[in-house]
Image: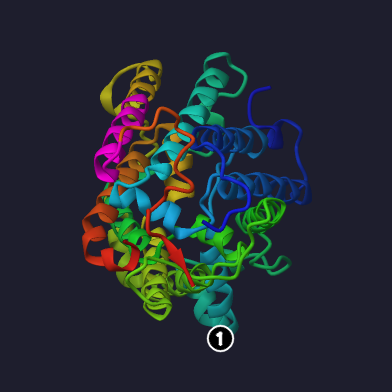
Amino acid sequence: MDGPLSQVLKFSFGTEMFVSVLVGIGFGWMLERGGFGRADNLVSTFYGTDFRVVRVMFSAIVTAMIGLFFLDVLGIMPLSSIGLLDTYLPSQALGGFLLGAGFVIGGYCPGTSVVAMVSGKIDALIFVIGVAVGSGVFTLNYDTLAAFQNSGARGRVLLSDYFHVPSGVVVFAVSLVAIGAFWAVGKIEARVNGRVAPSSPAQGAGAAVGAGSAS
Amino acid sequence: MNSNKPFWNPYVAGIGLGLVLLASFVLTGRGLGASGTFKHVAAAAIHAASPTYAEENGNIAAFFANPTRSSMNEWIVWLTVGTAIGGAAAVFTARRFKIETIHGPRTYKEYRWMLAGLGGIISGFAAQLARGCTSGQALTGGAQLALGSWVFMISVFAGAYALAYFVRKEWI
């Protein structure tokens, strides 16, 4: 095997689309079970009351990162055989900042809003409509925005290239940073919520944004 | 709260999400995503209004290059169809589907709806600018250790923390 299964097994277009639905089902299932089908569980991270977003996101990234690293090192699936994301620092920095602003203002990000919408959340339905509108606004102004969006194009740059270290070092460093973040957010939560740090990370769902309510 | 079944331990959910992302890479060579679907939906609406304009717009022209296939017949759209199915399956089996509006105790749902719409519009624009959202950039590129995706991720947190104070009445 020297690449993803879709290439090795030469998936037909229909098979590939079907596999995408299956992957999406897993994605939606995990987001919902993780508590991301309601805005209070998401924005609580930005008020220091429950860092569920940080815990779920970083443990997901570390899990997939370690998997990709070993598939690459063992020659089972070279990293170069999958679609690596290109780097455009100006548009990714500004786009990220605005997405974060939209996240805390609107309560969701595009993926979680889909799960919250099918969970019955009216605020998520409105957010979903907003995302489509915002997306259309960008497209309608593409002529003006294209130059900025394409500025600083660097192609495929991995952290290991940028820092000139072996990829294993980055994997190790990111894992350590994640563990440090898990420890730190527990301390912050304890301080913000004014109680002793919970020994079990299982708290959270119910304790999210202490006062979160619904109508 | 309203949940009849507790949510998973966040680390368990995170590892599960990471395994789904890894499976996606192994199966199709692509990661996860969501905002691409919104781009397709908006593009289809623009195309319905003015086919010529859409086919000449540099951002979406490629969607309409193949006249034998619908512009919506794309992997990212199918992935989002799956996301909705998977989310619905999870919420119904946990018996926590509920039609409601989530907001803090000091505000009204109409105010929350207005900000949900505003936040959605900003997010839709931002995800286009950055070529992806929390899933398509932060999760997917984060696991690949792509430089730009990590800059994106840090910027998302920066933007959210920077604005949190100003919308605190919405949530706490």
Circle 1 is placed at which residue position? Answer: B49
Task: Report helix, strand or loop for mark 1.
Answer: helix
Q: Residue at x 52, y 76 (%)?
A: B54
B37 relative position to A206: left or right:
right
Callout 1 environment at 10 Å: few (<14), some (14 to 19), or many (20+)? few
Q: Position of residue B152 (x, y in %)?
A: 33, 46
Q: On what subunit does the disc labeled 1 rest?
A: B
Where A203 falls versus B85 (above or below)? Answer: above
Q: Is residue B11 magenta?
A: no
Q: Nearer the viewer, residue A200 or A154?
A: A200
What residue type is disc 1 on?
Ala
x and y percent of residue B15 in the render? Answer: 54, 32
Image position of B39 (left or right of B162): right
For residue A182: magenta? yes
**Magenta span covers which residues?**
A178-195
- The answer, for residue B35, to whether it is visible in the render is no
Q: For residue A116, what is the image quadrant?
A: bottom right
The residue sitting at 50% across, 58% down in the picture is: A38
Identified at 30% across, 60% down, the residue is A101
Q: Position of residue A162 (x, y in %)?
A: 28, 29
Toward the top, the furthest residue is A74
